[in-house]
Image (cartoon, coloured by chain):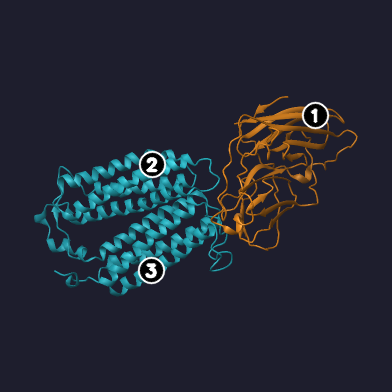
Chain colours: A orange, B cyan
Amino acid sequence: MLLLAACGGGQQTRTETQASLPEAHIDPATAGTITGKVLFKGEAPAMPVIDMSSNPQCERQHHTPQKAEVVVVNGNGTLKNVFVWIKAGLAPARWAPPAEAARLDQNGCVYQPHVLGIMKGQQLEILNGDPVNHNVHAESTVNAAWNESQPPRAEHKFKQFSSEEVLFPVTCSVHPWMRSYIGVSPHPFFAVTGDDGTFSLKGVPPGTYTVEAVHEKYGRKEGKLTLAPGGSAVLEFTYGS
Amino acid sequence: MAAKDVVGYRAGLHRWSILLAFCTLLLVVAGGMVTSRDAGLSVPDWPLSYGQLMPPMEGGILYEHGHRMIATTVGMLTIISMIWLLKAEKRRWLRILGVVALVAVIVQGVLGGLTVIYLLPWWISSAHASMAQLFFSTTVAMAIFTSDWWLLGPQIIEENQKYRIRALSLAAPICVLGQLFLGAAARHKAIGSIYHICGSPIVTGVVLWVALRILLHYANNRELRTASVVLTCITFCQVFLGIAAYMTRIAYADAVQPMPLMVTFTVLHVAVGALTLAASVTLAILVRRNVTAAPLEFREAGRVAVV
Ligand SMILES: [Cu+2]
């Protein structure tokens, strides 16, 4: 296990013309898997309960008080909502985005999911399941930022991001507690840790990679690994308060 | 002499000017709420709100659209002020000030719209915040210029050649405006709040320097005496509010939404900032009107009094 603290701003604009790159393809015979988990050491910070009293229509949709999701430590001592991706090591190639859209839902004035991974060029479908107005503000800096309203029962919004950008906030100013994050990856090898704190990147070509974990509060960490043909590699990241 | 007998005094116009200044202060408070409540982008479109004149006033929309509604009202009041001045006011420079005020309020509205459309770039937001403070001072000056006591003329005193005040009095509003800009820039995340914090003892010092010099050497003039005391009191309030705003901000650094106590102190700090600038502008105006640079015998009292 090799853990390196990232030294600042790993975001860069990929300006090379995509058309000139060869189309990526995975050879199932040699592709391998990177798995692992994101551990959290120390005492988990207590998350405040969100005060939705300024919007009774938001409040009414929850039977239990909603806690902020800035730091969610799972029961097994792992950290939820960490974006994990291959940051470097893949041969330059053009990866086709999946046909199905990634979904960002607004439900009870909370974003679902809290952290979303999406591929460059993939459709992002934004839904408003609430009886209230939201504004959706993509606070991206590499991709052009935008801010649009989404009234209740409005049509779903479809958006795309054309550049790699890990990780930027999506916020709503009608409900200032609403905050989610999007990571735009140029390839399909990314994951977001869930309730068990694990991640799994499948169908990865053999090679030596830098894998990065990004958390909204605790920042970036890197790990390096070599994946043998058809092999599997395990990586652990450890955050702490 | 009763107020109605003062030549050129129009009670209605004066009261209207006071109303405009008061509504402008409310507008500054409403604008401060928008920023402190993080509501600036809750209404993405401008000049309409969610494509309507009246969107549902929920959450951040209440603050952002409420601010737009109060701003529209102040714009209307300013238009009427200008028309009133153009029709009834004899002093040409005051008629011009009425036009300047309307131009300022229009520019200010456009700045507010642009900052929403361009997603709150710090320099448009800070210009909008600073312009708001300047506009409030303009409305206060208009209320003063239309008052009966202003029209009664100054109580001319000679500048003390050892403790000059005419030039120095300008330093206070300039420093306060600079400090307000630093505060706005910090609020809109262009710079750290350290610059605004470091600016505060300097500005407070300059204000005290001006006020004390007046109280020590020009205290026989009632206008100057009163204005100095008022400016000093407002400045002290402002320093305490600044400390409170900073402390609540630190205390709630990890909050996931704007906390009411932080919002309250910050918005009060913005509003009293507007009052500080207005008080320092007023003091400078009164110094320039009451204190003559040249020895008295060379000036005709009448010429000075008409202004
Ligand atoms: Cu919302």
Q: Which is nearer the eye, B156 or A3?
A: A3
Split into quadrants, the picture shows ligand 1 in the one at: bottom right
Q: Tell me the amino acid under the disc marked 1.
A: Ala
Quarter of the image where one finds residue A90: top right
Quarter of the image where one finds residue B44: bottom right
Badge 1 marks a residue whose secondary structure is strand
Q: Which residue is mark 2?
A: B243
Q: Does A50 sit above or below residue B66? A: above
- Name the residue at 29% across, 70% down: B13
- Name the residue at 43% across, 38% down: B194
Give the chain letter at badge 1: A
Q: Going from the N terminus, do you reach mark 3 or mark 2 first? A: 3
Q: Position of residue A68 (x, y in %)?
A: 60, 44
Give the chain letter at badge 3: B
Q: Position of residue B35 (x, y in %)?
A: 48, 52
Q: Few, some or many C-alpha atoms within 10 Å of disc 3 (few <14, some 14-19, many ≥20)?
A: many
* View extreme (right): residue: A29
User: Left of B69 or right of it: where is B142?
Assistant: left
Q: CA distance from mark 3 to mark 2?
A: 35 Å
Foreground disc of the pair 3, 2: 2
Q: Does label 1 lie on the same chain as label 2?
A: no
Foreground disc of the pair 3, 1: 1
Q: Which residue is mark 1?
A: A233
Q: Position of residue B222 (x, y in %)?
A: 16, 55
Q: Position of residue B149 (x, y in %)?
A: 20, 63
- Name the residue at 29% across, 47% down: B172
Q: CA distance from mark 3 to mark 1?
A: 71 Å
Badge 3 marks a residue whose secondary structure is helix
Q: Which residue is mark 3?
A: B77
Give the chain letter at badge 2: B
